Amino acid sequence: KAHALMTVQYDTFKNYVLPALELEGIERLTFNDLTKEQREFIEEYFDEQIFPVLTPVAIDAYRPFPMLLNKSLNLATLLYDEKQAEEENRTKLGIVQVPSLL
């Protein structure tokens, strides 16, 4: 079910949301689409305003799964340690709870 819901979500975004934004003159840009000055501004903004309020949590066999606040936005990411490339289990899960002030 989750896969089907994600497919509907992406199709809706691609076929309805993006065209509606474009009609209003709103563009969706990637980092590489930005000018050098825009990239520098974004990097500085992230370093000064966003990064200081983020608290990443690594999840592995030695730590219990963290309590996640109800109705909060959390980002999950896979962490890869290149130094442990020979080991089978070198990928770990990380979670970053997005603070409500963002």
Image (cartoon, rainbow, N blue to C red):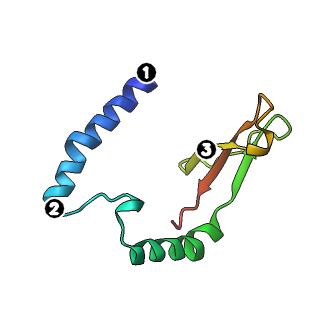
Give amino acid for label 1.
Lys
Residue at left offset 77%, top offset 30%: 89
Residue designated by label 2: 24
Residue designated by label 3: 77
Q: In the image, which disc is placed on residue 38?
A: none
The image shows residue 30 at horizontal and vertical percentages of: 37, 57
Quarter of the rendering containing residue 15: top left
Q: In the image, which disc is placed on residue 1?
A: 1
User: Position of 91 compared to 40: left or right?
Assistant: right
Give amino acid for label 2.
Glu
The residues tagged by marks 2 and 3 sit, at their Cα atoms, a distance apart of: 33 Å
Establish if 13 lies above or below 52: above
Quarter of the rendering containing residue 64: top right
Q: Is the residue marked by circle 1 packed among few (<14), some (14-19), or many (20+) residues within 10 Å?
A: few
Label 3, secondary structure: give it.
strand
Residue at left offset 38%, top offset 24%: 4
Q: Is the residue marked by circle 2 packed among few (<14), some (14-19), or many (20+) residues within 10 Å?
A: few
The image shows residue 55 at horizontal and vertical percentages of: 68, 59
Q: Nearer the viewer, mark 1 or mark 2?
A: 2
